[in-house]
Image: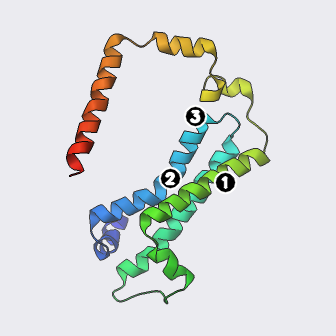
Amino acid sequence: MVIGLLWIPVIQGGKGLYDYLQGVQAYLAPPIFVVFFLGVFAKRLNRQGALAALITGFAMGLFRLAVDTPVKLLDGFAYPSGSFLWVVNNIFFQYYSILILLVSVGVMVGVSYMTAPPVYEKISGLTYGTLSDEDRQTTRSSWTRRDLIASGIVLVLILAAYLYFTG
């Protein structure tokens, strides 16, 4: 709670709470997405690669937050124009998020291929690439007509909300 109270001036120094939360999420979510997404679809990737991607992405996000904080906290503070920290601070946060995503993908794939592959018996049925025909049949047989209709309704509602709010 004390840290939260001390952090209020940092949040106020930016464009507000919403903008600040979007930035923090943009810096911390990409490595989690990479580990989950690639972990589901690529059976060769392993835990060492996932851990390295999470640590690297998290470090990049914390670095960006550390670079942004003095600019938001200290009135009139700015990095020297053209310096490395100035460039990092002035990259649009969503572009920096894409950079974190790409670096996390590279780290996860690179470390996974430099280390031993996972034991197939331990990951059997857990990734898309390790599903057997029996696993697929079991999954499909569990779907009911009601599930398919409900899924279709959810998709239509999401599309309607998207189209409504695009202006």
Neighbourhood count class around disc 1 (C-alpha, 10 Å): few under 14, some 14–19, many 20 upward: many
Q: Which residue is mark 1?
A: 107
Residue 55: tell me if it is visible.
Answer: no
Looking at the image, which residue is at 47% across and 9% down?
141
The residues tagged by marks 3 and 2 sit, at their Cα atoms, a distance apart of 15 Å
In this orientation, which residue lies closer to the viewer: 101 or 58? Answer: 101
Residue 59: tell me if it is visible.
Answer: yes
Q: Which residue is mark 3?
A: 40
Residue flagged by tag 3: what amino acid is it? Val
* Label 3 or label 2, whichever comes before in sequence order: 2
> Eyeballing the image, is 30 above or below 153?
below
In this orientation, which residue lies closer to the viewer: 65 or 84? Answer: 84
* Label 1 or label 2, whichever comes before in sequence order: 2
> Eyeballing the image, is 53 above or below 127?
below
The answer to whether marks 3 and 2 mark residues whose Cβ atoms lie closer than 8 Å is: no
- Coordinates of residue 162 in the picture (x, y in percent): 27, 43
